[in-house]
Amino acid sequence: MSSESSKRITLPGREAISSEGPRGQLLVVSSPSGAGKSTLCKRLRREFDDLGFSVSYTTRAPRPGETDGVEYHFVDASTFQEMAARDEFAEYAMVHGNMYGTDARTVEAALAGGRDLIFDIDFQGGRSLRRHFGEDVVLVFILPPSLQELERRLRTRATDANEVIERRLKVALSEMEHYAEYDYVILNDDLDTAYDALRGIYLACRHRIARTRFLAERLLAGEEVSTR
């Protein structure tokens, strides 16, 4: 079998993936506010530039430094309700008094095109995505080392009013009770260690049989496969 006559392909998540390749996957990372999920998600995206970020819609006001269309799509309540009525969200939920939702068309296009997306959303959103997309979803929950440390992080961040911080602390305990709905749990008591765990989970999931079966099938059919 000559290399000239064979078809060369690449592993999933590397370069472009053909329409005959695997579906993408949805990596959902959840945690109580202040446990470090956003920092971990951004770090993973910096390392894997082919990992897309699902930009949610929200009715909350932008925080200092946030840009519309980058961290979130910021919309008013009536616009959000109209989008929900048109079934434009794959999932949406009320979180800390504001609405958050994931655009369904973006998710479906990514999955069909073999592109991975990472989600920085709460347990309600993760639950809804798992219900709609099944095994395409990988759920990871980030735990803080303690409630005292969680409070310290929230107050150090100083982007929310005191009453908002108090509400987030009360909600945090109930959110952590949902850890058992997740596939993986990471304790973020050291950022580098927590990142190594998240990175390992993502790399392992990229090579699940559901995503790599086509490589073996093409090899058995006489085609050449490559990791380059």
Image (cartoon, rainbow, N blue to C red):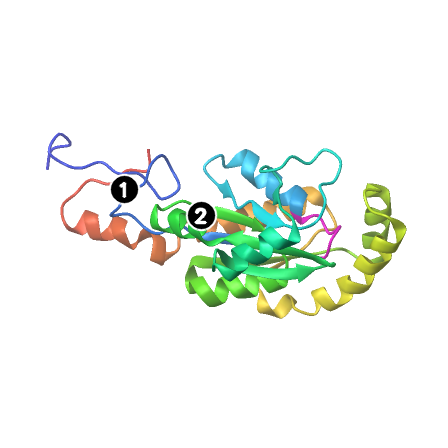
Q: Quadrant of the C terminus?
A: top left
Residue at 75% across / 35% down in the picture? 64
Coordinates of residue 128 in the picture (x, y in percent): 53, 65
Exactly how many numbered labels are in the figure? 2
**Magenta stretch?**
31-37
Q: Main secondary structure of the magenta part?
A: loop
**Depth check, front residue: 184 or 152:** 152
The residue at which mark 1 appears reads as: 18
Residue at 36% across / 34% down in the picture? 15
**Depth check, front residue: 218 or 166:** 166
Residue at 24% across / 48% down in the picture? 20
Estimate how packed mark 2 is, as few (under 14), some (14 to 19) or many (20 or more) residues with alpha carbons within 10 Å: some
Residue at 73% across / 59% down in the picture? 97
| SS for callout 2 | helix
Q: Is 87 placed left or right of 152 in the picture?
A: left
Determine if the magenta segment contains residue 141: no
The residue at which mark 2 appears reads as: 106
Above-or-below relation of 90 to 21: below
Above-or-below relation of 205 to 129: above
Above-or-below relation of 199 to 172: above
> Can residue 118 be seen in this snapshot?
yes
Q: CA distance from mark 1 to mark 2?
A: 18 Å
| SS for callout 1 | loop
Give the amino acid at mark 1. Ser
Which mark lies nearer to you, 1 or 2? 2
Give the amino acid at mark 2. Thr
Coordinates of residue 199 in the picture (x, y in percent): 55, 45
Q: Quadrant of the N terminus?
A: top left
